[in-house]
Image (tube, rainbow, N blue to C red):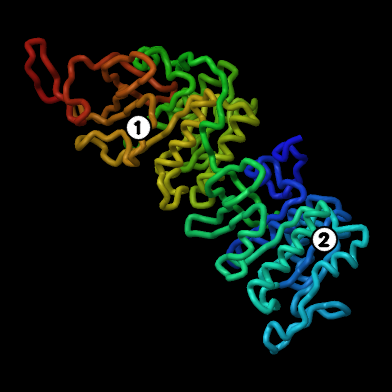
Amino acid sequence: MSEGQQERLGTGVPGLDSILGAGLLPGRSYLVSGQPGTGKTTLGLHFLAAGEPSEGVLVSLGEAERHIRDDAASIGLELDGIQVIDLSPGAQGEGAATYSLLEPWEAEQPDIRARIEAAFPAGPPRRVFIDALSQFQLLAPDAYQFRKQVMNLLDYLTGAGATVVFTAEQGSPAEQDLRYLGDGILQLDWRESGRALSVVKFRGSRFAEGRHTLRLGGQGMRVYERLVPDEHCRQFSPEPVPSGIPALDRLIGGGLDRGTVSIISGPTGVGKTSLGAQFLHEAARRGERSAIFSFEESLATLRHRCEHVGIPLDEMVERDALTVVEVEPLALTPDEFAWRVRDEIEARGARMVMIDSLAGYRQSVRGEDVGQHAHALCRYMANMGVTVLLINEIGSITGGELRVTEHGISYLSDAVLLLRYIEIGGEIRKTIGMLKKRTGDFEKTLREFEVTAEGLVVGEPLHDLRGILRGIPEVVDRAGGATPG
C-alpha cells in the first residue's frame, strides 16, 4: 500500500479531512501556525477528541490543564480519559516546569520525552498534541539546541507510530525553525474578509490548495473548502427547460437549456423574481426539485409575492419540490455560501437554482473579487447539470445606457432575459426580451410582459414600435414613419 493510500487519521474538524485528502498520514508530524486567536489550540483539541481517549495525549507548554479542559467542554469536545501533561508556567508538582525571572537557559528545561515515557511506558499513544511547541525555544540555550531537541522529540514520537500535531505562533523565531521540521503545515489566519485555513505543505499526499474559510463557534471549528469547479462534474442531457408559458417559451427558443446560467435582469419591481419563480414552478410540475437562495427578501415576503401571481410556494415547499434559503450576506463568506449550494445539489438533488440577487451575493464577497467567486460557483452548477437563474437589478428605470449587470459578470451567462419599463400613451408598461442565448436560437423581438393575479402574461411581439430599449418607444406606421408612443 502506497503512502498516499494509508489509513488516515481524521482531524475531527468538519470539512478539513476532505481538504487533506481524507485526513492526516499516520506517523507524521504537522505544524499548525497562526497568530493568537486564530484557532490553533481548537484544531488540536478536535484532533485529540476524534480518537479514543487512550489514543491521545496533550502536552501543554502554554496553558494550564484546567483551562484547556474547560475550553474544550465549552465547545462540546470531550477530553475525559485523555492524558494531559501540564508543562505550563503555572504548573505545580513533581516534574513540572518552573519558570522564573532568571535568564531562560538558567531555568530547568522540561524533558517532554521523559514525561511522555513516564505516562506511557509501552510507547507514546497514537495521537500527540503539543501546544505550543514554540514556547520550548524560550528554555533552549540557542537556536541550534532548540532545533536538535525538537528533531529528536519528533523522531522519537513518529518513529514509534505516533501522529503529532504541534502549534507555533506565526512569525516567531521558533515558528520559522519549526516550519522545516514538520511533514505538513496548516496555516491559520484572519483578515477583514474572515478567517481562513491554508495548507502550505503536506508531504506524501495530495491536498486542496488555496485559502479555505474557517469558522470558530459554539461547536468548535469548521472548515469550508474552496470551490474548484473542474473537480465536479455530472452526466446530464442538455435539453431545454421550459417556463410553462407558451408565448415565453417561443420567445426564448423552447426553454433555458439544462446546465446553463441565465441572468434575469431589469429595474426594481419589474417582475424578475416572479419570472424566476415561474421556471421553478414548472420544474416542480415535472417532478424536479429546485432551490431559491434569497439575499433580498424573507420567506414571508417571497411567499406573498408568489401567491399573488398564482405560484403555490408553500405547496412546493411542503412536498419537498422546493427549498427557500434566506441568506444574510454579511453572515456568510463565499465558501460557506458555495457549501450550502453544493448541499442542495449533491445531497438533496436540486436541478434548478435561483440566486436572488447578484447585489446581495456581492455583499457576501466583502471586497474580494466577485467575478472569481461567481465564476467558480456558476461553472460548478453548470458542470453538475443545474439550470441557474441569477436575478440582477439594474439602476435605471427607463432610458440611459443599456447594461445587463453592474457587477462585470455578464460574461458568465449563457442566456440573458431583459425586463424593461416603457411608456406608451402615458401608461407605464413592461416588456421582456432575450438578448443572448449561446445554446440555440431565439426570437429577436420584444413582447409585452404583465404580472397579474392569474399569473404571468407574455403578449405578442411588439412589431410596430421602435426605441423600446430606450424606454420611450415610437409607433412605426406602414410607410416607415414614426410617431411618439
Residue under the point 44% across and 28% down: 276
In the rendered image, residue 126, in percent from the top left (x then y), is placed at 83, 53
Label placed on residue 220: none
The residue lying toward the viewer, choosing from 440 and 179, is: 179
Residue under the point 29% across and 27% down: 430
Residue under the point 56% across and 19% down: 235
In the rendered image, residue 396, in percent from the top left (x then y), is placed at 26, 39
Label 1 amino acid?
A: Tyr
Q: Quadrant of residue 114?
A: bottom right
Contact (CB < 8 A) between labels 2 and 1? no
Of all residues, the one furthest to the bottom in this rendering is 101
Secondary structure at badge 1 equals helix
The residue lying toward the viewer, choosing from 383 and 303, is: 383
Report whether 340 appears left or right of 61: left
In the rendered image, residue 124, in percent from the top left (x then y), is placed at 85, 58
Observer able to see residue 311: no
The residue lying toward the viewer, choosing from 170 and 144, is: 144
Secondary structure at badge 2 equals strand
> To which residue does mark 2 refer?
57
Q: Quadrant of residue 389?
A: top left
Question: Comparing marks 2 and 1, which lies closer to the viewer?
Answer: 2
Name the quadrant of the N terminus. Answer: top right
Q: Quick one: label 2, few (<14), some, or many (20+) residues within 10 Å?
A: many
Looking at the image, residue 48 lies above or below residue 131: above
Of mark 2 and mark 1, the one earlier in the sequence is 2
In the rendered image, residue 372, in percent from the top left (x then y), is placed at 42, 41
Label 2 amino acid?
A: Val
Q: Quadrant of residue 90?
A: bottom right
The number of numbered discs placed on residues in the rendered structure image is: 2
The residue lying toward the viewer, choosing from 361 and 86, is: 86
Name the quadrant of the C terminus. Answer: top left
Label placed on residue 411: 1
